């Protein structure tokens, strides 16, 4: 494992500052001057390493809101694979290391890339947001494992639906997994009604989103999962989302199973494969692709290389691609915002079901150690796999 990096989790205490002997004046809805003091606690990392070994709490004061900045309160922040990889130092993008901004003499980086916030206060030049609005992060590397932050309008995308329609967890988890599935189903090959795609890690957040979007767009899917004791329950779960077929890795690697797949698809083609694992599982789905098919790799959970037989290139003209949402998002911010809003609309309408979630809960009355322990437990569940359940930091 690569050397260590320390995390901190941000909790903000807000206390109204009254002047002795005076009755506070009624303030306007949009405050342009800070009328409270702010102390924050954050989960950050100092050096790369195993997250469970380097988590610590850091306390710091937030700067005052200026004319063009915004004070936000975090509502929910997922623990995603990229977040953990950034702690370990094995991810291409690196979060900024801060000193003065977080009252630290040692450079520290706040973890987390995805999150939902509530607007608390805006500067007098800010017209796009008002207190009470909700927003999600427009870009990565903001540092979302905290309770409050100072942001600007370029950091945020407004959530167009009220909390009665879209929960904080739904908003916080809409911009990565469903967006990844959306783009992969659209970008690499033209998929027509009743065309098939095949994917590994079908019970992951991206896999579940791909199943549901595929169903909405008239696509059929073969979904590969690892075998387990409750495999029948998992198959029923994924089928309820719209999975056409669900198979185990042991089934898909059986050469005789190809005849079963041929019976399923008839005269249709498997044009697209989505790979989140690597290793043997990826090789097995590549073998199922039709001539001219495309295999898109967006993750490597097995930490093994993608291996494809030469014969598939020569005789079936298979195409291999990599997909990284961060690169696409940075170059298409407006299009990403449109897609996220479309996904939020599908969630509101009940067309997309939530990914299973374990909430990592923080409350105002928790001690620093309780906060740290709760966050570590969430990371521990993520590392152990937690049977396809997403870990989300939730502030209550």
Image (spheres, rainbow, N blue to C red):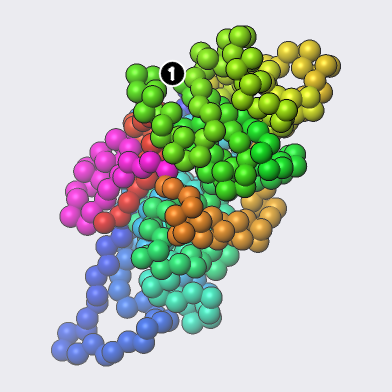
Magenta highlight on residue 350: no
View extreme (right): residue: 314
Q: Residue at x 30, y 55 (%)?
A: 395
Crowding at dot 1, Cα within 10 Å, few <14 / some 14-19 / many 20+, comes out as some
Residue 293 occupies quadrant: top right
Magenta region? 355-378
Q: Position of residue 113 (x, y in %)?
A: 49, 48
Can residue 100 be seen? Answer: no
Which type of secondary structure does the marked residue at label 1 adopt? loop
Q: Residue at x 61, y 36 (%)?
A: 220
Taking 281 as reference, is 245 above or below it?
Answer: below
Q: Position of residue 92 (x, y in %)?
A: 61, 37
Q: Residue at x 17, y 85 (%)?
A: 20
Taking 142 as reference, is 224 above or below it?
Answer: above
Taking 123 as reference, is 378 above or below it?
Answer: above
Q: Position of residue 329 (x, y in %)?
A: 64, 51
Residue under pointer 1: 227
Q: Position of residue 376 (x, y in %)?
A: 31, 36
Q: How many marks?
A: 1
Taking 320 as reference, is 149 above or below it?
Answer: below
Query: Looking at the rendering, in which quadrant would you find the C terminus?
Result: bottom left
Can residue 302 be seen? Answer: yes
Q: Residue at x 50, y 27 (%)?
A: 246
Q: Is residue 129 left or right of residue 385?
A: right
Which residue is nearer to you in this view: 277 or 77?
A: 277
Residue 34 occupies quadrant: bottom left
Q: Is residue 94 left or right of residue 191?
A: left
């Amino acid at each position: 494992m690569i050397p260590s990096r320390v995390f901190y989790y941000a909790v903000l205490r807000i206390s109204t500052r009254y002047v002795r002997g005076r009755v506070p004046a009624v303030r306007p809805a949009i405050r342009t001057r800070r009328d409270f003091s702010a102390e924050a606690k954050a989960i950050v990392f100092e050096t790369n390493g195993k997250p469970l070994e380097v988590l610590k709490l850091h306390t710091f004061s937030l700067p005052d809101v200026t004319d063009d900045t915004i004070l936000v309160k975090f509502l929910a922040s997922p623990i995603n694979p990229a977040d953990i990889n950034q702690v370990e130092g094995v991810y291409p993008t690196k979060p900024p290391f801060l000193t003065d901004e977080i009252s630290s003499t040692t450079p520290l980086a706040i973890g987390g890339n995805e999150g939902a916030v509530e607007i608390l206060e805006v500067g007098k030049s800010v017209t796009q947001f008002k207190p009470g609005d909700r927003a999600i992060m427009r870009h990565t590397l903001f540092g979302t494992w905290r309770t409050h932050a100072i942001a600007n309008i370029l950091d945020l995308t407004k959530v167009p639906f009220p909390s009665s329609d879209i929960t904080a967890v739904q908003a916080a988890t809409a911009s990565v997994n469903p967006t990844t599935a959306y783009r992969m189903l659209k970008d690499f090959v033209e998929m027509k009604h009743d065309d098939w795609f095949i994917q590994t890690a079908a019970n992951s957040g991206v896999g579940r989103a791909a199943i549901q979007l595929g169903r909405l767009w008239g696509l059929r899917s073969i979904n590969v999962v690892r075998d387990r004791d409750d495999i029948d329950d998992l198959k029923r779960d994924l089928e309820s989302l719209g999975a056409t077929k669900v198979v185990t890795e042991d089934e898909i690697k059986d050469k005789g199973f190809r005849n079963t797949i041929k019976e399923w698809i008839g005269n249709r083609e498997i044009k697209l494969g989505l790979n989140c694992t690597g290793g043997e599982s990826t090789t097995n789905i590549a073998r199922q692709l039709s001539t001219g098919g495309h295999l898109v790799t967006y993750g490597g959970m097995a930490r093994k290389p993608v291996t494809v037989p030469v014969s598939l290139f020569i005789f079936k003209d298979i195409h291999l691609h990599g997909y990284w949402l961060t690169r696409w998002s940075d170059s298409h911010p407006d299009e990403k915002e449109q897609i996220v809003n479309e996904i939020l609309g599908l969630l509101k309408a009940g067309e997309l079901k939530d990914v299973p979630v374990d909430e990592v809960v923080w409350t105002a009355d928790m001690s620093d150690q309780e906060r740290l322990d709760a966050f570590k437990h969430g990371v521990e569940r993520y590392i152990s796999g937690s049977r396809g359940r997403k870990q989300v930091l939730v502030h209550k």
